Image (cartoon, rainbow, N blue to C red):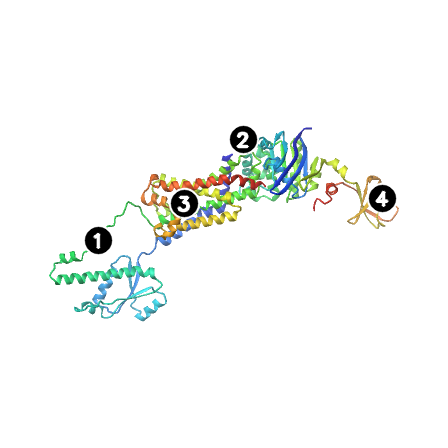
Amino acid sequence: MIKSLIYKEVLVIFKEKGTFFWLFLLPIFFIVIFALIFGNQKTSQTVHYYDADRTAASQQLIETMQSTAGFDLKYDSKKSLDSQLASLKNGKITALLVIPEGFEASLNAADETSPTSLKLYRDASADMTIGPIKALLNNVVSIYKDQKITAALKESGQTDVEASAAIAPPIEIQDVAEKAFKNDSVTQYVPGYTIMFVFFIMTTMINSFMRDRGNGMLSRLRSTPMQPIHYLIGMWIPNIIVVIVQCTVLLLFGKIVFGMHLGNLFALFSVVFILSICATGLGLMISMVSSNENIGNAFVQIFTMGGAIVGGLWYPWDLLPEFARKIGVFLPHHWAQDSLQNIMIRGANVEDVWQGLLILLAYGVAGLVIALLRFKKFITSSVS
Amino acid sequence: MTSVLKVDRLTKMYGSKQALDGISFEVKEGSCFGLLGPNGAGKSTTMKIITSILEPTSGSAEVLGYDIRKQSAAIRQQVGYVPQEITLHNKLTAEQNLAFFGEMYGVKGATLKERIRVVLEQVGLADRGKDMVGSFSGGMKRRINIAAALLHRPKLVILDEPTVGIDPQSRNHIFEMVRELCREGVTLIYSTHYMEEVETLCDDIAIIDHGRVVVQGALDELLERYTTKAVYVEGIGLDGAPEAEEIKSVVQEGKGWRLETDEPLRVMKAVSERYEKTRATITALEMMRPSLESVFLSMTGTSLRD
């Protein structure tokens, strides 16, 4: 009987067009859109400048800045300074670096004690954009300072080596990258949106249970030799199958279309399987405790979307504010994403993601237990 | 004749609302038993208790010799229940829907395949087995809904309002199917609020209202006991209501009169003789069939349709 229930429910789910839309088409759409937008994101930042000096020194300054990776200096020779400042005022550009007339002369002045000024005009509302530009300028200022100190040390009779040693920083940063595969927007959004849309299986489950309760199917099945627990199992397992198929399709889509690295397949399947138990266990619980379809689906929306935000499915976990991470760590979304990313990016195996698996399983089991406790009431409400 | 169903003082409470108030009745083997009553009278609750979907608050019932409280599993094996609601999946074919219900009753493999073929023929939809149920009319869906309860060859079939909102063709199919099942020896309990259906199909009836059995017995006996015979006359140029010694009362009805009497044939003769002598033209002169509406009216003081 369980087999018959499973077969029937699988047929019903896969013949429902809405299933394909919610569980397959919509996540693929989101994955493609976000991967295209953020995958091809321009990494260099444009810095507009106006060179009023037009000397070798000002040109050297521009070249020094230009040589820094991540910045693209742009000079519009056709526009006057006033015109460019007007563009800044209108919000068309966020910053304008002005090299004043007499910049070279000021640098070369032997007895100059006050520093040569560069003016950075900026849009006061664009702090996030200005930050990196200021860091660039501070770096350039630091280079000029080192040159000045080196020249002074040489003048005082020190050799090149001695002068270099004197200005060498006492601390250096060593960049040590652990073993990792490509970590980019694809490894953020493909598992992220896969997990988010996995939780929408709860909507499918709520709709199925409410349908059977509302149209008399459950009542009718109670008149057959079927045991109530058979019904619960028969309605649960098809959704586990659907989630596994859904994850397989979406992750393979990521691999085939974006070349995403899947990592250890056994570990990956383990996460997918436990995630399917987690999402469907919670789906059973919500179906049993909700008095109607609208209440159940409203809860699913809040849980799924809210969990996606604070669980690090939409943004990298490290970029989330502290308070969001404090909430996210209690949600299955985070642990599913963390486990999948560890497998895909850091080459983790099952034993490396046991903590995430255990937490996901705990959520699923908790959902199942609550569903079982509420099942009798659900059955009774269907026949009275 | 043995009883397949004995209901004894059943009560059912939904919270503080009393749905059944000590109903008792019996159903004879091989009969078509009509459970008649207005909406909300307690018919569906009674049927759900008989099929052990619901538990009664008090009282007892035996179905095919099995106690509904202690032997519900045995009852479920041998009873086919057709609910008022259409419980089919529109995205599945008629055969897929029937296969699902057949398996729920424990019918499998080649037997199930054969039973699906037979029941589809019984409901007159043998050529639509592979079509999606979503493409069916309401009447066709009702027929498949009934077919789903016949797959395991039940000894007792319970039909709860099986003809609500369907076309005449499907209604006729259902009537014919009910008659055929009765001929095969299957006992049927037919719940409806359409008294004409009970009059057409059933041998015995129970009229239920406000959770109580108002009256029960053989249909013919009840009609004989609780209704007055009458003659209806209608014509052109009639000079007032007909008069005759045998007429107990005259009620104007439509364009004519209903003449209540214990001797309808004598009244008909008297009326025809009287108007033969005048120039009036009689357009209708017929014996009125006693109806369950009259039974319900005489027992409850209200119309069944109220």
Residue A180's spot in the image, x, y percent?
Answer: 30, 45
**Residue named by callout 1:** A171
Displayed quadrant of residue B24:
top right
Residue B17's spot in the image, x, y percent?
Answer: 63, 43
Looking at the image, the residue that sits furthest to the left is A157
Q: Would you place residue B294 above or below residue A306 in this image?
A: above
Displayed quadrant of residue A154:
bottom left
Q: Chain of mark 4?
A: B
Q: Chain of mark 1?
A: A
Distance (Cα) linking label 3 and label 1: 41 Å
**Residue named by callout 2:** B110
Mark 4, mark 2: which one is toward the viewer? 4
**Discs 2, 3: same chain:** no
Packing grade of label 4 (10 A; few <14, some 14-19, many >=20) is some
Q: Would you place residue A197 above or below residue A59 in this image?
A: above
Packing grade of label 2 (10 A; few <14, some 14-19, many >=20) is few
